[in-house]
């Protein structure tokens, strides 16, 4: 493990301690992972750390061009093609590369639909209520442990009502965010494709939209140039990443994959190119 990574892990441990389970419990329970770095994760229950490396990742899956760690979404091994897969007599004379990787006319509507689903749908509202109930149940767990089950239930229900009064679902505010956020995501997507060569097929618009939407919680910047603005309200409004697969049929690693796409597209970017493409100074956007 590199010195930089060791320092990050040490800071994370200080912030997360004390852990519910001892270090010896690693492997005896289902770890609850959170990102420390792009390819480094830590279990918030026992403190175990997973750093991605070829042969070290226990949970992987094979994709079209390599092997991906299921925990982080990082490619840990590229696929190597054997010599026999090369065919010298293939005729490519009639091949014409497609000019448009995705339909920009319909992409805007697709992006708005996806953003609306994650912010304003009935499923989003259900998950929001579940999150509040789960929080109140955890905070009142001591009463149940002491045998006061009836009092615990009453406090949970009363607490949920109070929590919803202080922090309502905010349907009107969520609806107001859909159009400007979707417009910004579509603009960034189009700019990255045309100005920085980010590959994007029509069928990938949903996954990239979801990834960019979650990245907007903190934004994406290159030095002091905002590539994707930060919208802090999204941190409170978006469903938990762990719920994406079960309720929206969206893989949670989509967010990491989108971040990788953006970083790869901007690997050779300069301040001049970013400014020329229309990106501005980093700031938190309030719509």
Image: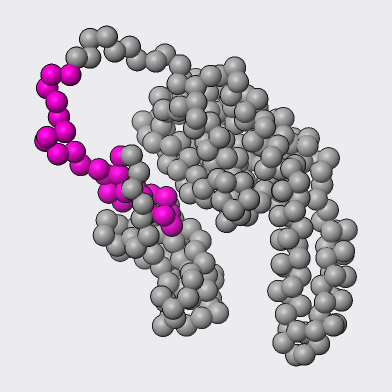
Can residue 160 be seen by looking at this rendering? yes
Q: Give the image location of residue 106, x and y in percent.
A: 60, 20
Residue 228 highlighted magenta (yes or no)? no
Q: Quadrant of the C terminus?
A: top right
Q: Quadrant of the N terminus?
A: bottom left
Q: Is residue 166 depicted above or below 265 in this figure?
A: below
Q: Is residue 68 depicted above or below 144 in this figure?
A: above
Q: Residue at x 67, y 43 (%)?
A: 118
Q: Is residue 133 depicted above or below 120 in this figure?
A: below
Q: Give the image location of residue 252, x and y in percent.
A: 52, 50
In the displayed structure image, the side of residue 170 where residue 248 appears, left or right? left
**Residue nearest the viewer, comparing 181 with 54:** 54
What colouring does the structure picture have?
one colour
Q: Residue at x 44, y 78 (%)?
A: 28
Task: Examine the image and state in which quarter residue 3 appears.
Answer: bottom left
Q: Residue at x 12, y 34 (%)?
A: 84
Q: Give the image location of residue 49, x and y in percent.
A: 41, 68
**Residue nearest the viewer, comparing 262 with 273:** 262
Residue 88 highlighted magenta (yes or no)? yes
In the displayed structure image, the side of residue 26 where residue 219 appears, left or right? right
Q: Residue at x 42, y 41 (%)?
A: 260
**Residue nearest the viewer, comparing 150 with 19:** 150
Q: Residue furthest bottom?
A: 146
Q: How many marks?
A: 0
In the displayed structure image, the side of residue 34 where residue 97 appears, left or right? left
Segment colored magenta: 65-90
Q: Residue furthest top?
A: 94
Can residue 215 be seen by looking at this rendering? no
Q: Give the image location of residue 180, x and y in percent.
A: 70, 30
Task: Examine the image and state in which quarter residue 161 appears.
Answer: bottom right
């Amino acid at each position: 493990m590199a010195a930089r990574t060791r320092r990050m892990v040490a800071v994370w441990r200080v912030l997360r301690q004390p852990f519910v389970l001892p270090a010896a419990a690693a492997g005896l329970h289902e770890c609850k992972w959170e990102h420390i770095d792009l390819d480094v994760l830590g279990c918030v229950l026992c403190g175990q750390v997973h750093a991605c490396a070829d042969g070290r990742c226990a949970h992987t899956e094979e994709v079209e061009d390599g092997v991906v760690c299921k925990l982080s979404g990082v490619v840990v091994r590229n696929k190597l093609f054997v010599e026999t897969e090369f065919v010298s007599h293939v005729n490519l004379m009639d091949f014409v590369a497609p000019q448009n990787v995705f339909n920009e006319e319909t992409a805007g509507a697709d992006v708005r639909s996806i953003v609306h689903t994650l912010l304003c749908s009935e499923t989003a509202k259900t998950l929001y209520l579940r999150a509040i109930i789960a929080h109140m149940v955890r905070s009142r767990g001591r009463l149940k442990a002491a045998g006061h089950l009836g009092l615990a239930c009453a406090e949970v229900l009363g607490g949920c009502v109070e929590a919803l009064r202080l922090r309502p679902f905010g349907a009107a505010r969520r609806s107001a965010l859909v159009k400007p956020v979707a417009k910004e995501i579509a603009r960034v997507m189009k700019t990255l494709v045309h100005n920085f060569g980010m590959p994007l097929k029509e069928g990938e618009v949903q996954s990239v939209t979801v990834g960019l939407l979650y990245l907007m919680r903190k934004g994406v910047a290159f030095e002091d140039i905002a590539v994707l603005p930060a919208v802090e309200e999204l941190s409170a409004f978006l469903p938990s990443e762990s719920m994406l697969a079960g309720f929206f049929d969206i893989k949670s690693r989509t967010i990491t994959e989108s971040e990788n796409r953006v970083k790869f597209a901007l690997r050779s970017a300069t301040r001049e190119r970013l400014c020329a493409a229309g990106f501005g100074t980093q700031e938190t956007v309030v719509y």
